[in-house]
Image (spheres, rainbow, N blue to C red):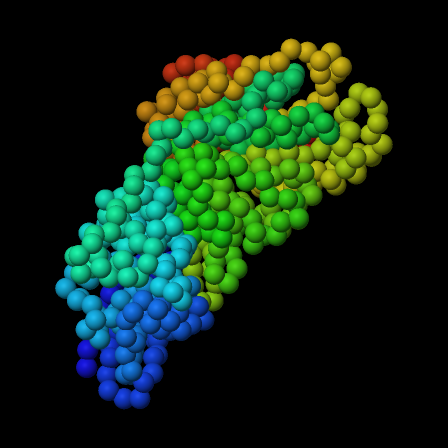
Amino acid sequence: MSLAVIYSRAQLGIESPLVTVEVQLSNGLPSLSIVGLPETGVRESKDRVRCALLHSGFEFPARRITINLAPADLPKEGGRFDLPIALGILAASGQLSGEHLKNYEFVGELSLDGSLRAVRGILPAALNSAKAQRSLICPQVCAIEAGLAHPEKVHLSDHLLKLTTHLSENNPLPLAMPAETDETEAGGYPDLSRVRGQHHARRALEIAAAGGHNLLFIGPPGTGKTLLSSCLPGILPPLTQKEAIETATIYSVSQHGFSTSHWKQRPFRAPHHTASAVALVGGGAQAQPGEISLAHNGVLFLDELPEYQRSVLEVMREPMETGHIMISRAARQAQYPARFQLIAAMNPCKCGHFGNPNGQCRCTAEQVQIYRNRISGPLLDRIDLQIEVPALSIDEFDGPKGESSQPVEERVFQARTRQIERAEITNAQMSVEHIEQHCQLQKDDRELLKQILRRFNISARAYHRILKVARTIADLDGEVSIQRKHLMEAVNCRCMDKTLL
């Protein structure tokens, strides 16, 4: 009886828990059984492994083979365990020395000819392998993704034979190359200079970018709401190394896969209004990340906001507060980060022309109210900036170009720097304790704000968000304390509080 132990990594959300692959060869009728809660893709690995070993010139043992994937209560899925299973069989049958196997972890799917294919979740596997003080051996096609973690701890191979040669210390495998991040361009977003007029909306966009605030544009069709929204990622500060790794990890485990063209770029997700709640927050049989997680550290744009099903919009309320989403299914749970910046656009009424001076709107006041009531009050409370985007006149449409994105991005970066130095978080993420400490008002300004709260029946949550926005405006002006002009501008950035009374 022979026993071999190989280390690998499973995928559970963005986590990559350790899986110990135990392979035992014993006397009896030739058979191969896999235990340890394997799903169909894992059970089918026995056929892929047999063909890969035979095509690579190895012997497939004609004995009773038992493979245990521990821990037994962790679901195993996909072809990621093909490689450790094949190596375990070789080590248990004496065709491969198991002396150095304890220093490595293996992840990869095998082709029938022994070549290695890519699998999802290489990045979190590489990160966790390095924490465990072991090197990861993965397919060559995952080189760039694996190099984002700890390239000195990642070996690459495109065939089973090359890997076994490396383990025999005859021909070492190459290490992953460090990711080239310095020359990566973060462009590709529309420039703000394309926006004509709409000075109030442009100012709100700058405030939203500076403080990480949620933003809602309300206006008739063709006023530039979508264009303004698509300009937001171009004026946000670049991702830090930690944020870039977090975002890349989510894409690594998702069905979209990781793409180097988006490395260190803030995500911009714009799902259609027919998207379901599962598509938005994530789910499915394998608990995949949804749009709010794919927009982590970036922007989630919801156009035609009232056209989304109300039940779909309501599922965003909790992750907007907590910054993460827990997807619970009968067999498993998966938690994904969801610290996104929401920017939404909507028409003022069903026909889209309410308030337009050309008089095209024929909607009654009741119809306008019904249309706007498709968005719940609790969701509106969580949107810091609510801005009207009026129709442009002919003179404004043909007017000069506005300020470009570059100087706006510089002001946003300086304001963000002040926030990080002050509280190590953006203003939008401030807790009540942070607000009490950093958003103090003068006595007269506090009394004025109380009068405004009574007049418009503003909730406590909206009150705190007004203070956060006022703090951001003060940061843009380089002021240490919040002044009355900052407070009044923040109040004027919540038009829905006044129109829905």
Picture quadrant of residue 39: bottom left
Quarter of the image for the N terminus: give it: bottom left
Side of 199 relative to 449 (left or right): right
Of the pair 448 and 462, the residue shown nearer to us: 462
The answer to which of 175 and 182 lies nearer the viewer is 175
Q: In this view, does 450 lie to the left or right of 40?
A: right
Please provide percent x and percent y for residue 345: 64, 33
Q: Which of 499 and 251 is in front in this view?
A: 251
Residue that protrudes farthest toward the bottom in the picture:
28
Quadrant of the rendered image containing residue 191? top right
Residue at x 71% of width, y 16% of height: 397
Judge whether residue 36 can be spotted in this image: no
Compared to residue 251, the image places residue 111 above or below, namely: below
235 to 139, vertically: above or below:
above
* Residue drawn at the location 58% of the way across and 47% of the way down: 314
Identified at 48% across, 55% down, the residue is: 288
Q: Quadrant location of the C terminus?
A: top right
- Write down the quadrant of residue 344 in the picture: top right
Question: Residue 220: x percent and y percent?
Answer: 73, 28
